[in-house]
Amino acid sequence: MAGVRLEKIEKTYPNGFKAVHGIDLDIRDGEFMVLVGPSGCAKSTTLRMVAGLEEISGGKVLIGDRLVNDVEPKDRDIAMVFQNYALYPHMTVYKNMSWVLKLKKKPADEIDRRVRQAADILGLTDMLDRKPKQLSGGQMQRVAVGRAIVRSPKVFLFDEPLSNLDAKLRVQMRVEISRLHTKLKNTMIYVTHDQVEAMTMGDRICVMELGRIKQVDTPTNLYRYPANTFVAGFIGSPSMNIVSARLNFDGDTCYVDSQNLHLRIPDDIGKKVRQYDGKAIYFGIRPEHIHARETNPEAADNFFNMEVSVVENMGNEVYLYFTPGNSQYIARIDPDIPVRSGDSHEMWLDTNYIHLFDGETKENLIYKPKTQ
């Protein structure tokens, strides 16, 4: 096994477009690192540069202590699982999984041992004589993973491997891949645009936007301590409510004013942002920290009447959509609280859990990243 280190990696295409802007990333030996971000953020390009499938314009890629910039993909001791399964339709599952080992002229008994061991790990033992057309999408993806396992690589690379599966199969496969990592303990780098996949699978997550890294941290820290508005809005489902606002102090008391909201901020938070008095900022609060008044009738501050525009009942929880002024808020409340679209309902914002971001840099003013 081995860690992977990217040092000032860049990618510029012949037309002059710069896709990756000198990123640094240190992936630890045995770690499950997820690269996540919207389409076009260069996460797959970054992965392909690690694999050697994309030429590097600048910087260094190291696998273990070995510089691999000019090393052919087949010689990097990595295995890659793609979005499309890329199975040979005329070959059985056994032959699909064993083919790469035959090309390397491995002994027949070693090939058989590796294939059957991988098949056992992935629950494919009873399918080794089947051909791809006889398999479901989830089974074909497991074969593609098995083909990677038999190579016993130092690093596994996954490029959006679950995108072609339906919702139920995606959940099953992400559990299987996480279980596989626990068992094999290899370094794994996993690319996805799905932040739920990222949060449930990664030891750490690298959030990317437009070829730059916005934050690298554990799922818990990304959720609780987002470094900027991009991470705050991207991580979490539903996403954090983020609106433009202004900070105002009355003596030592701090208020956030936004549209028709006038929020009193806890004193400990106010002390951290005193220098932003009178300045434009961004105010953020997660849906679970906006409550119906019934849950806390004794609270003295931060009650507001809001007209409910949409109600989404998820069974175990309800999402309420409000549109005060030109802003939209989402609240996550208990399904036993009766609320209908069009109702005017009194809500309470728990300002102990707010986030304040610089109006220009969009960096978090309260919480600094708590990297682990």
Image (cartoon, helix red, strand yellow):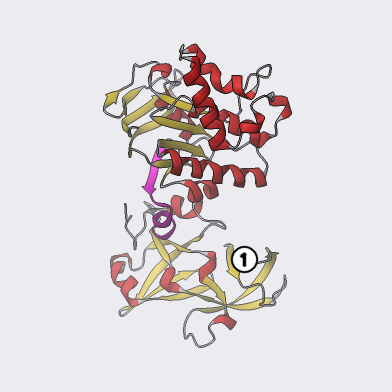
Q: Position of residue 161 (x, y in %)?
A: 56, 35
Residue 194 can be seen, yes or no: no
Residue in the image at 42% along x and 42% along y:
32
Looking at this view, is 231 or 61 the one in front?
61
Please say whether residue 153 is one of the residues in the magenta stretch: no
Residue on which disc 1 sits: 323
Q: Residue furthest front?
A: 109
Q: Position of residue 364 (x, y in %)?
A: 36, 57
Q: Is residue 47 above or below residue 249?
A: above
Res 185 → quadrant = top left
Assess disc 1: are there few (<14), some (14-19) or many (≥20) residues with their C-alpha within 10 Å of its C-alpha. Answer: some
Q: Is residue 248 above or below residue 199?
A: below
Identify the element where label 1 is drawn: loop
Query: Which amino acid type is shown beneath numbered disc 1?
Result: Thr
Q: Position of residue 277 (x, y in %)?
A: 33, 68
Q: Residue furthest left?
A: 65
Which segment is the magenta one?
Answer: 212-225
Looking at this view, is 247 or 215 the one in front?
215
Q: Position of residue 330 (x, y in %)?
A: 59, 64
